[in-house]
Every structure is written in C-alpha cells, then in structure tokens.
Amino acid sequence: MACALTFTETLKGPLTSTYFNEKEWELKGKIYESFGVNFYRKLLVWVGWEKLNKKSNPIEKKTNALVHLHYRTKQSELGHLIILIIVLGFNFFVAFEFGVIQSLWLLILNVLLNLYPIFLQRYNRPRIERAITLSRRR
C-alpha cells in the first residue's frame, strides 16, 4: 500500500484518461448503490475512517478545493486499482497452491479494502463534478 501511495502521490500528471470518466453503464451511480456503496460509506464513518480523512483533507466549498478533491479521487482510485490487481495476482497464486478456501480471506479483504473504495470514488466523482459545475456558475 505504501508503494502505491508513494507512486500516486508523486505522480503529478493530470490523470485525464477516459477511464476516469463516468460510463453509461454506471447509470449515474445506481449500479454502485445496488452493490451497497452507501452501506460501505456508513461503515467508513462507523470505524472512524471518514473522520481521519476529513482531518487530513478538510472539505471546503471553494471551487479550487472541489477541483483538488476531484483530482484526489482519481489518485485514490488509481492507487486502489494498482493494489487490487497485485493482490488479485497473489490471490490466484494462493488459490492454486493452497486451495480456494485458503484464499477466500484474501479475496474478501481485497474486495473490502480495494474494490469498494474504487466503487466509492467512482460513485463520488460525478457528484463532485456537478458541484464544481455549480460552483463555477456562481
């Protein structure tokens, strides 16, 4: 995780890939809601992650802050995606070497710690984009 964090933090590119754009199949976030992203958000608040995150990255109502938050969602998603792929490789190795049952805990942790954060970033980014648009109109 530290390596992926270091990589995404030092990566100062604009992250303009079309991968980060909202896709039609995402149905304006409805697909993520059906996967339980709102429950996951509540879980993050319950365990205290949201409080820690808001301390280090306070949310302001200025357009520049929203643009920065939008960029941070891309950085976070990229970091989680890199880790998801790496851990998935280890997961396949463990499944083939030691059996699927032995690899289930790794798969569950990978889903909770990497896949759901990706879902959450993809769910939040269009909402932040709408807020940026509204903020620029004023």
Image (cartoon, grey):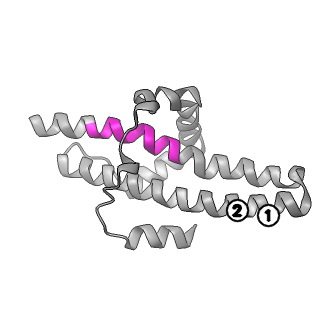
Give the residue at x 67% y 52%: 110
Helix or strand or loop: what does disc 2 sit on? helix
Choose between 86 and 62: the one closer to the eye: 86
Residue receiving disc 2:
89
- Give the position of the N terminus as an image quadrant: bottom right
Question: In the drawing, does residue 131 fall left or right of residue 21?
Answer: left
Choose between 16 and 136: the one closer to the eye: 16
- Give the position of the C terminus as an image quadrant: top left
Of the residues shown, which amino acid type is indicated by label 2? Answer: Gly
Region of the chain picked out in magenta, as a range: 118-129
Question: In the drawing, does residue 85 fall left or right of residue 41?
Answer: right
Q: Residues within 10 Å of mark 2 (few under 14, many from 20)?
A: few
Residue receiving disc 1:
93
Give the residue at x 46% y 58%: 78
Choose between 93 and 7: the one closer to the eye: 93
Of the residues shown, which amino acid type is indicated by label 1? Answer: Phe
Q: Are marks 1 and 2 in contact (CB under 8 Å)?
A: yes
- How far across and down, in percent of the image, does residue 135 sit? 16, 38
- How far across and down, in percent of the image, does residue 91 sit? 75, 58
- CA–CA distance between discs 1 and 2? 6 Å
Give the residue at x 90% y 55%: 99
